[in-house]
Image (spheres, coloured by chain):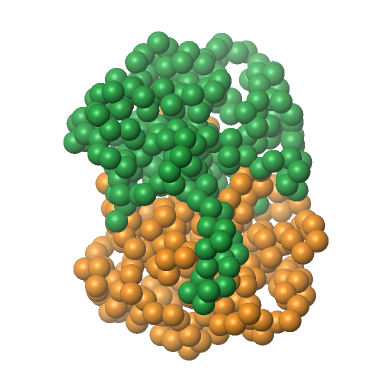
Chain colours: A green, B orange
């Protein structure tokens, strides 16, 4: 059984706040950290703690500056590739849950590093190293609605590679690489919620693929990208 | 807290099998069904129970027959739009976990109807109506690995529409329609596993958006599709 628990009571995060302390306090209220736990934190609070906010009269100008490439554009709606290689709406630049109407929140500069920093701090406090995932809500081609995905990962591999494994009949499996990092991110979103003000979650009971891990493993390499 | 439980002990499903009885037995072993539960079943066993199998020397010919449109093709790798409107690899035609090397499994003709039938049978047996999701593993544009998504839905809305809701500052939320049906499907995948032979899961503690529901709500309408 997998349990997905909201980490509640985290206050509005400000630039310079010690996010690991705030998440750690919430973990303590939830009963602490156990070996094998996965801690999921929304990009928004990571970015705020890291000061990745700015005033912007022109939202679209910031998006175009943050974008390494524009994949599609329809008016102010821009699907862009970020410096990290993620393809998402508005290059991850967000105008909701900001300090003011003319503020935007940018993606963390290095979300894997953000996850690794949080992981190290939680390990020091609780004596066990969790896997950590930083999430954002991405739209998808061909499907309505956003799902939360992993944009930063530490302490687990975000892809479960079953190549070489076989089905019940001994035949090699077909769809063999599973983006479990994204599935964990989406599972956490179900208890976090955008309006509810719960920016983190704890997932217990999932044996994540072992390894250092990076969200960049989830990025389709250009030579395999059929939707440039 | 949300709990995601594997529904274990379901035998290899054959054409004509009573899938609702098999899933119901597994639910009983897991302690029964409670109000508000979501039952998730993989497309593979739904298709098998419905006899959606065929012998095929030429896998690609079946894919092209099942496709309403081919979106991209690179050799034998085809990204196609199915009759249901889903865009996925191989039009959902699968060669793993089949009865033999030259067999393929097709998607259910009407996965919403499959979900509704399962829902009605489970309601009759347990006295409470679960939400039901039929899942398949889809690849994504720009991201590596598959995630499980909802291709059939009954008894819940797969989109959580937060338009009109506000953030902590009272500002309208930006990314406001969440594909919770897909997030639930992905969460279930984490306990199902392709090789493990667990084709169903139970999700408890999630207040799914109320409504009849259809997986077609998750399909991007053509006028909003930037990746035709």
Q: Residue at x 60, y 13 (%)?
A: A56
Q: Residue at x 63, y 67 (%)?
A: B92
Q: From where the camera sits, is residue B212 visible?
A: no
**Does residue A216 appear left or right of residue B81 in this picture?**
left
Comparing B54 with B84, the one in front is: B54
Residue B226 % position (x, y): 73, 45
Assign the N terminus of chain A to one quadrant of the image: bottom left
Q: Is residue A125 above or below residue A147?
A: above
**Does residue A202 appear left or right of residue B211 in this picture?**
left
Q: From where the camera sits, is residue B37 visible?
A: yes
Q: How many marks?
A: 0
> Residue lying furthest bottom in this view?
B16
Comparing A45 with A206, the one in front is: A206
Q: Is residue B182 above or below residue A39?
A: below
Res B116 → quadrant: bottom left
Q: Residue at x 51, y 26 (%)?
A: A111
Residue A186 % position (x, y): 45, 45
Q: Is residue B110 above or below residue B170?
A: below
Comparing A88 with B219, the one in front is: A88
Q: Is residue B120 above or below residue A154?
A: below
**Does residue A151 appear left or right of residue A74 in this picture?**
left
Residue B163 % position (x, y): 49, 39
Q: Residue at x 47, y 35 (%)?
A: A212
Residue A199 % position (x, y): 37, 31
Assign the C terminus of chain A to one quadrant of the image: top right
């Amino acid at each position: 059984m997998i349990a997905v628990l909201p980490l509640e009571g985290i206050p509005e995060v400000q630039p310079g706040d010690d996010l690991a302390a705030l998440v750690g306090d919430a973990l303590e209220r939830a009963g602490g950290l156990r070996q094998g736990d996965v801690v999921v934190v929304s990009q928004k609070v990571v970015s705020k703690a890291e000061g990745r906010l700015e005033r912007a009269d022109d939202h679209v100008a910031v998006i175009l500056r943050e974008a390494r490439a524009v994949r599609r554009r329809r008016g102010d709606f821009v699907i862009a590739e970020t410096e990290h290689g993620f393809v998402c709406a508005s290059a991850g630049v967000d105008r909701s849950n900001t300090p003011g109407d003319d503020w935007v929140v940018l993606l963390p500069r290095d979300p894997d590093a953000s996850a690794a920093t949080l992981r190290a701090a939680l390990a020091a406090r609780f004596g066990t190293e969790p896997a950590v995932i930083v999430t954002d809500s991405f739209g998808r081609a061909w499907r309505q609605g956003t799902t939360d995905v992993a944009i930063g990962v530490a302490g687990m591999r975000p892809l479960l590679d079953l190549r070489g494994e076989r089905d019940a009949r001994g035949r090699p499996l077909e769809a063999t690489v599973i983006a479990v990092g994204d599935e964990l991110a989406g599972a956490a979103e179900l208890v976090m919620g955008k309006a509810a003000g719960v920016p983190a979650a704890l997932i217990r009971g999932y044996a994540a693929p072992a390894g250092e891990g990076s969200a960049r493993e989830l990025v389709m390499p250009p030579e395999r990208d059929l939707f440039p």
